[in-house]
Amino acid sequence: MTTSTLVIGAFGFSSASTRWTWSDAMFTLHGMAPGDVVPTRALFLSHVHPDDRERVGDVLDACTRDTEPHACDYRLVDLTGETRGVMLALAPAASDDGSSAVSGFVVDESVRQRREIAAGVNAELQVALESHAAIDQAKGMLMMVYGIDGDAAFEILRWASQQRNVRLRVLAERLVHAVRSTGGMGQRTRNAVDELVVASMSDAPLPDPRPQQHRLEVRVDHRAPIPTLHVHGHVDITSMAELAATLGRLTASGRDERRVVVDLGGVEDVGAVARVVLQAAQRRSAARGVTMEVVGADMPSAPSGAVRQPVHQADRRALVSRS
């Protein structure tokens, strides 16, 4: 019996005869035309993969002794040498001469399996393509806004995804959706892009590069009464990894005093990126028993579990005098 997805060959044998009976589909499974050969146990086992042959023989023997059905999977090697996985199912059957008889089926699901595999591969490929497209769009946004290359943009996305344990594709999709839902990056950014597009359409020289914002500068002062990190310049998404790494080193240096200070007096704008990085650093410090005090900017209160010890006025003057 055959269907569009299955090939099922039927067979039978008894202990009274060495000859087996095969259905037409059974011959087809083995790459033969019906009646080409006389089916026997030896012929059947010769088309079982050598590594499976002993196990299949044991199943054939067990079914002649027991009254229960038996089944197993094995690799069938047809007359052309093609190997594919099939399932063997056996059950005791009635015999006219009183001898032990067995009827069975060999089920070839290779067509169905190939279709399922192909469907799975296609689905995974589609997800991969969609993920790649979303990540490329997010990278392009970062490249345009910050004037960085693709590798740097990807590293920013990767770092951000690790901070909150968000899959990279999900993070990229959220970023793209957020930019679209807000209508873009504002009129000033649009005007700047307009100039670049128009200049790129002709041989006209591109606009002169504008002065870059002050780069991030960080310095740990170990001479202060409390280990202090002085931060100067601009904190944005391109510098958040550097700031996070420096805050980690600051925490390690403050284990003896159980306190560290982050001085943001030299930061141009304490925006969302700086706050996210600092809050994460405060949580990590609190978990290590170190209080991280932030001065020079308004920050949320210390995380729960941290013993918040305010910086005394004398300490503040010392910090300022050394910065």
Image (cartoon, grey):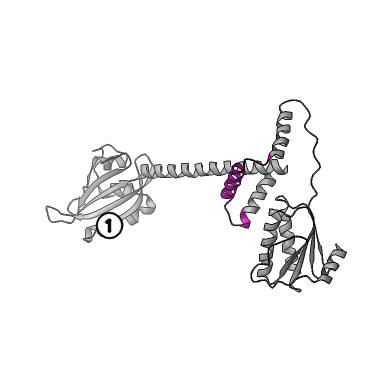
Residue 194: percent from left, percent from top: 70, 33
Image quadrant assignment for residue 295: bottom right
Quarter of the image with the N terminus in it: top left
Q: Is residue 169 left or right of residue 99?
A: right
Name the dominant secondary structure of the magenta segment.
Answer: helix
Q: Is residue 83 left or right of residue 25?
A: right
Disc 1 marks which amino acid?
Answer: His
Locate the C terminus by quadrant. bottom right
- In the image shown, does 47 or 279 lie closer to the viewer? 279
64 relative to 190 in the view: left or right: left
The question of residue 176 being in magenta is answered with yes
Q: Residue furthest top?
A: 202
Please state which of residues 160 and 295 is positioned toward the viewer in this rendering: 295
Which residue is pictured at 81% across the width and 35% down the height?
Answer: 208
Mark 1, residue position: 70
At horizontal 37% and vertical 39% (from top left) the residue drawn is 80
Q: Is residue 163 magenta?
A: yes
Q: Position of residue 49 (x, y in %)?
A: 37, 49
Q: Quadrant of residue 82?
A: top left
User: Up-down: is 90 above or below 136?
Assistant: below
- Residue 250, position in %: x, y? 75, 65
Side of 21 relative to 74 (left or right): left
Residue sitting nearer the eye, 274 or 7? 274
Determine the image quadrant of residue 33: top left
Q: Secondary structure at mark 1?
A: strand
Q: How many neighbours does mark 1 have within 10 angstroms: few (below 14), some (14-19), or many (20 or more)?
A: some
Residue that appears at 65% across and 67% down: 303
- x, y percent for residue 91: 23, 55
Q: Bounds of the magenta span?
A: 161-186
**Residue that appears at 72% across and 63% down:** 248
